[in-house]
């Protein structure tokens, strides 16, 4: 009844696969687990040795890295059940009834169910501080609050979706860009698919180093700019884009672009330090968007 799909790249997914397999078995539901090694060069044998021991579980291996969007498409095409539970490789269920909680949602008629994300309260090493603090501040949001704007706060590393809907929406993500989750959510809204949020979180374990996370943030903003140029009606649903459009309306985006250019070294020093300021991070994002779009 549920296909649990886990794309991975050079990450040990043994503990995650064993946990969801155990939970699904205890819940006595029809399930399968399919994992996809996306051009991984490490840990393939370790993951295979774990998965081969489990019933209803398989490992697909790609010799080349095809990217997250294509990896998910391949997994969805291979899935035999009508509901797909996508999990990122670097997560772990917060609750012992994680699978059962999702199973209970199947009869409610929702098209997509997002479970949410959580972060450890343990303060990480300085190298990972920006990602951890951002996650704790903006991503660790309860279901009640997320349901107020169901298409806005979405965690693509932990969600249940009807197979037919996923294949329809994901097939539109033809561009190999980072940050297409915003586009995915916008397409769900455009097509009036019913999205619900529940408190069924996973812990995000694989934190990016601050410098890499900042780079990925810039790439996701460039994707938003691409959406602005190609799919304006969709990009306007994003909060950052709304701020940008407001600034542009009064031509303040030009001023902010100039300010960002002169202050970006100071901003980066703070964001890559031991106590990154989240207000400055938000300013960095909108400033980067103004500067990049000016070019």
Image: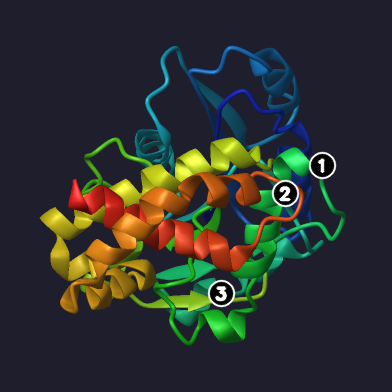
Looking at the image, which is closer to me, 157 or 2? 157
Circles 2, 1 touching at the beta carbon (< 8 Å): yes
In this view, 173 is above or below 154: above
Q: Earlier in the sequence, mark 2 or mark 3?
A: 3
Question: Which type of secondary structure does the marked residue at label 2 adopt?
Answer: helix
Q: Tell me the residue that label 1 is attached to.
A: 125
Residue at the spot of label 2: 129
Checking the image for residue 105, the label placed there is 3
Residue 79 placement (x, y as % from top left): 44, 42
**Coordinates of residue 178 in the picture (x, y in percent):** 38, 42
**68 or 241: which is nearer to us?**
241
Q: Residue furthest left?
A: 230
37 or 2: nearer the viewer: 37
Q: Mark 3 or mark 1, which has the lower sequence index? A: 3
Q: Work out whether residue 17 can be spotted.
A: yes
Seen at 55% across and 52% down, the residue is 267
């Amino acid at each position: 009844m549920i296909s649990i799909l886990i794309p991975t790249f050079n990450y040990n997914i043994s503990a995650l696969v064993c946990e969801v397999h155990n939970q699904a078995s205890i819940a006595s539901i029809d399930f399968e687990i399919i994992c996809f090694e996306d051009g991984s060069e490490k840990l393939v044998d370790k993951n295979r040795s774990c998965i081969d021991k489990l019933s209803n579980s398989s490992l697909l291996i790609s010799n080349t890295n095809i990217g997250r969007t294509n990896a998910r498409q391949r997994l969805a095409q291979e899935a035999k059940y009508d509901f797909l539970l996508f999990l990122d490789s670097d997560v772990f269920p917060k609750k012992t009834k994680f699978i059962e909680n999702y199973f209970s949602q199947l009869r409610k008629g929702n098209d997509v169910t997002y479970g949410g994300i959580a972060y450890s309260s343990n303060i990480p090493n300085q190298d990972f501080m920006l990602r951890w603090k951002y996650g704790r501040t903006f991503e660790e949001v309860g279901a009640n609050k997320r349901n107020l704007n169901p298409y806005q706060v979405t965690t693509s590393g932990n969600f249940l979706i009807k197979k037919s809907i996923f294949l329809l929406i994901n097939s539109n993500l033809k561009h190999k860009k980072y940050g297409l989750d915003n586009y995915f959510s916008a397409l769900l809204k455009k097509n009036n698919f019913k999205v619900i949020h529940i408190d069924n979180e996973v812990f995000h374990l694989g934190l990016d180093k601050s410098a890499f996370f900042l780079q990925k943030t810039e790439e996701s903003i460039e994707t938003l700019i691409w959406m602005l140029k190609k799919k304006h009606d969709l990009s306007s649903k994003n909060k950052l884009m709304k701020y940008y459009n407001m600034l542009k309306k009064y031509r303040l985006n030009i001023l902010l672009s100039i300010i960002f250019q002169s202050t970006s070294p100071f901003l980066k020093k703070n964001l890559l330090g031991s106590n990154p300021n989240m207000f400055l991070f938000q300013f960095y994002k909108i400033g980067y968007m103004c500067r990049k779009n000016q070019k």
